[in-house]
Image (cartoon, grey):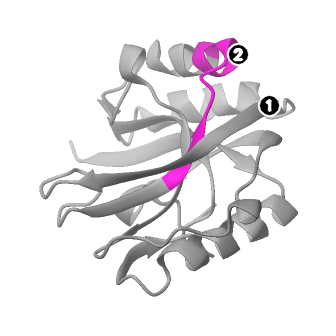
């Protein structure tokens, strides 16, 4: 049976999303971008990405629905840049990652563990290696350093969503 990449994510409000999209473009817009935030790549913190069969996806959708009325606090702790080697699942060509790291708070970790217990085949870093973050983008050339006053600090409120995973770990249909 054919598998589909699907994910549960936390989304910020519209105003925060717009500021994160602007930051993404400021950092990577002129650096041969491979992926920048925008309409088909909304900002998010991944709870879990899976590679499940079409008949397994309703289980993750039901788990998402159980949390639909909640909001989650996500605390930004810094801006991270990393080199991604060729052959990566999300960025096969390799390149430069840039994103916001967030604290792995107990409630966020518990949510991640709940979704892991669904037993669907996970993609990416999971379990003890789970590292929540907001991917701002990927570029072929070293990304720029933004004005540090443009980097969000403190706690953001986010709500849960889910959908099919697109290129570079994006969610084109959210």
Residue drawn at (26%, 60%) of the image:
91
Residue 158 position in % (x across, y down) = 78, 41
Q: Closer to the camera, 124 or 144?
A: 144
Where does the image place residue 45, in percent across and percent down from the top left?
60, 43
**Residue 119 in view of the camera:** no
Give the quadrant of residue 153. top right
Query: Which residue range is magenta in the image?
Result: 99-110
Residue 143 in the image, given as x and y percentages of width and height: 42, 71
Element under disc 2? helix
18 shown above or below 116: below
Give yes or no for residue 107 being in the magenta stretch. Answer: yes
- 135 or 163: which is nearer to us? 135
For mark 2, what is the residue?
A: 107
Q: Is residue 127 magenta?
A: no
Name the spot of residue 67 as percent of width and height, x first: 76, 27
Residue at 84% x, 33% y is 71
Residue drawn at the location 85% of the way across and 29% of the way down: 70
Q: Establish if 11 lies above or below 59.
A: below
What residue does disc 1 label?
73
Q: Residue 64 versus residue 73: which sits nearer the camera? A: 73
Give the alpha-carbon distance from disc 1 to disc 2, as whole Å: 9 Å
Q: Secondary structure at mark 1?
A: strand
Numbered label attached to residue 11:
none
């Amino acid at each position: 049976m054919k598998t589909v990449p699907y994910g549960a994510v936390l989304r910020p409000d519209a105003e925060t999303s717009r500021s994160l999209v602007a930051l993404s473009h400021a950092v990577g817009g002129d650096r041969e971008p491979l992926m920048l935030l925008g309409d088909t790549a909304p900002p998010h913190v991944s709870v879990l990405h899976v590679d499940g069969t079409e008949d397994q996806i309703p289980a993750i959708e039901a788990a998402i629905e159980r949390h639909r009325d909640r909001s989650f606090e996500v605390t930004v702790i810094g801006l991270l840049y990393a080199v991604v080697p060729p052959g990566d699942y999300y960025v096969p060509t390799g390149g430069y990652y840039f994103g916001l790291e967030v604290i792995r708070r107990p409630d966020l970790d518990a949510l991640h563990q709940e979704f892991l217990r669904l037993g669907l085949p996970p993609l990416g870093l999971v379990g003890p290696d789970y590292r929540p973050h907001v991917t701002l983008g990927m570029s072929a050339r070293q990304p720029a350093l933004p004005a540090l006053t443009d980097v969000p600090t403190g706690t953001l409120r986010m709500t849960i969503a889910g959908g099919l995973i697109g290129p570079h770990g994006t969610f084109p249909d959210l």
